[in-house]
Image: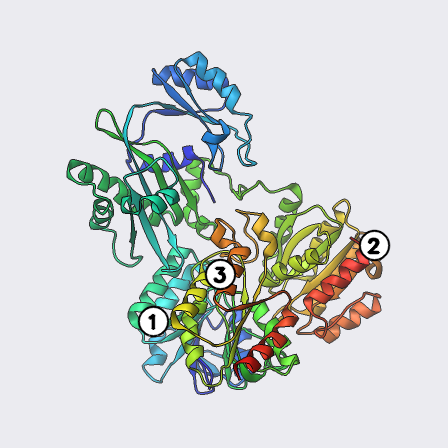
Amino acid sequence: MRFYEHESKALFARHGLPLGPRHLARSADDARRAAAAIGGPVVLKSQVLSGGRMKAGAVKFADSPDRAAALFDEILPIVVNGQRAESVLVEARSEVAQEYYAGVTWDGRRKLPVLIFSDMGGIDIEEVAEKHPEHVSKTHVSTLLPVTPRIAKEAVGATGVTGSELNRIAPIVDALIRIFFEYDLTLAEINPLARLADGSFAILDGHVDLEAEARYKHEALLHELGIRPEETRQARPPTDFEIAGAKVDASDHRGVAGNVVEFDGNLGLIIGAGGGSLTLFDAVRKQGGRPANYCEIGGNPSVKKVCELTKLVLSKPGVVQVAVMMNVVSNTRVDIVARGVIKGCIESGRDPGRTIAIFRIPGSWEDEGFKILKYHGVEFCDRSVSMHEAAARAVARVGR
Amino acid sequence: MSILITADTTFIVQGITGREAVNLTRENLDYGARIVGGVTPGRAGRDVYGVPVYDCVRDITSKTRVDGSVVCVPPRFARDAVFEALENGIRLVVVVTERIPRQEVAQMVELAALRGARIIGPNCLGLISPGEAKMGGIGGPAANTERAYSKGPVGVMSRSGGMTTEIANTLTAAGLGQSTAVSIGGDAIIGTTYAELMPLFAADPQTRAIAIYSEPGGRMEAELADWMRDNGCTLPIVAFMAGRFMDEMPGMRFGHAGTIVEGVADTTADKIERMTKAGIAVAERIEEIPDMIRARLEEAA
């Protein structure tokens, strides 16, 4: 989950990293007061969970409090890569002598964190790595050995930085590595780190991503930063339909019946498991089908959970039928899923035979499941029908 | 032969008294596995389907040869359980647990490398050498497992546990058995990648072709393509790529923890291109895999 710039900076500040005076503004008045308090030129930056702010015109400079207030109103409505801002960061604008880049992220191939440092900051680091590889260092960091200062020193030194500059930058980079580990981040980035005209250093922009799986370990930090438990911080905020799906999944700890993502089609999908859902969603689209949603069922969800998920999908406007499909299952009981979807149809006031376009879940307890489906007149198939063929039948039945 | 496990492999189950672990123990025993003990702290003296339970891994390794362990404990205890297995000399650790923070997975993997051990998973269903033995929930109850899996020449590697069985079942139905099928796990960092299993499959006389299930996210397919090229490997490989719709939805996570498109290299388009260039055939549908494998086997012969 990505942090806003102001949250990332608050985290950096907690660890004593150098930051200029700044205030978060939620109104034009806030922005005016912030600029007055800072005194002197300021920069206003829209707070969105996306890069490309400068290009979108969502970063602007002001020389007076009144100008800051006016720019706040200009910047706030700008949508950056689909992201809408709720606040604007007002920061002192300082004269920069040189910019650096420092970032820590995971290298999946090496299965280790990698520290990336460059003495050419402020621009896209991948571009620098391509055009000026001698100005970028990549240093892998052990997850077992303690973080000691030599890691940052070597990384900074490898780009040719030396003298007092090396001794001032290395501790900042060292702290960044520690923050990466302490908060289970998947990205901790400062870009740029600036050496100002007066010789001091300041983080001008930075951002961090916290791993969703580790969220439970960092409740205190999230609370302190004002990040609410329901904020997922995905590429786009969840829809009401998706929030309802998450509630269905959370209602019972047994099995999975969730990860609902809303689409705009006529065919509801009750599909699983992780890889099976990806395969089936592709298969439906390949047949020219229009899915109304993505979801994942897996493990052994209760009848009630499958029933509630079915009701939710059927409640979505425009959903004509649902297709119930999975790969050959190992642990999910076919009869329980069959009971759940049939119950969901009936409780939605729909006839299961007409509502379920196809049922394709082969595996344990399938004979019991098939018996129930037959009784309710539901079209089903066993493992002799492939996932793609089942998807094709569903699409043919519901119509494109 | 097969890779990693045979009927001879002895292993333990850590967290054996948990609900999922109890089922898995039963299913593995029914399929012929040699489970020599289980561990749940404070539960020593009990048994699960005749498998004695101990407090510590050491209580078992001090008495008998233990080749492997299946770790099936809640996420917050997983790292400790894996460390315990590794520090007691176990060389093959299958981690079933999902939702383990990445840093802790990296620590397990780093320690395993130091100890000369191998981790499969996390977030996986384990592995099976059909007709020999299985470790983990792969294939489910023994009767289901026997229906989907059969002994033969095809090695299977999959980022999805369920799709491992779907592919094996499709191969079996077409008369193509499997040497070993490995559910490698769906996380961003896993103990053993496709490329890391390739030397084992390449050296296995039973394995004559490979089937792969793949998804968006990560660099594992690029790593495999590089491995094929660098090693001049001629073992025929057919891959299936799921989640093609995700190429249009950057930043959204679907399916598994490691399944997200953040950059171009994460997209299915990029992965398909890399694999194709390395001579790996990419199937459009699961049911195409058997014929594609047959064609390549004939070509090789």
Pointer 1: what residue? B86
Q: Classify A354 as above or below A134.
A: below
- Amino acid bearing label 1: Leu
The image shows residue A371, relative to residue B152, as above or below, that is above
- Label at residue A120: none
Whether residue B43 is visible to the viewer of this picture, yes or no, is no
Q: Nearer the viewer, residue A36 or B224?
A: B224
Task: Residue at 84%, 66% (x, y): give it.
Answer: A377
In this view, the residue in front, A106 or A255, is A106
Q: Which residue is mark 3?
A: B274
**Which is more N-terminal, label 1 or label 3?**
1
Give the letter of the chain under mark 2: A
Circles 2 and 1, Cβ within 8 Å, touching? The answer is no
Residue type marked 2: Arg
Q: Are marks 3 and 2 on the same chain?
A: no
The extreme left residue here reads A163
Residue A204: x and y in percent read: 34, 31
**Which of the 4 image quadrants contains residue A306?**
bottom right
SS for dot 3:
helix
**10 Å neighbourhood of mark 1: few (<14), some, or many (≥20)?**
many
Q: Image quadrant of residue B192?
A: bottom left
Distance from the alpha carbon under mark 3 to that under mark 2: 47 Å
Looking at the image, residue B34 lies above or below residue A68 = below
Q: Is residue B117 left or right of residue A326?
A: left
Distance Cα–Cα, label 3 vs label 1 = 35 Å
Up-down relation of residue A329 to residue A230 (above or below) = below
Pointer 3 with pointer 2, Cβ within 8 A: no
The residue sitting at 50% across, 67% down in the picture is B124
Dot label at residue A350: 2
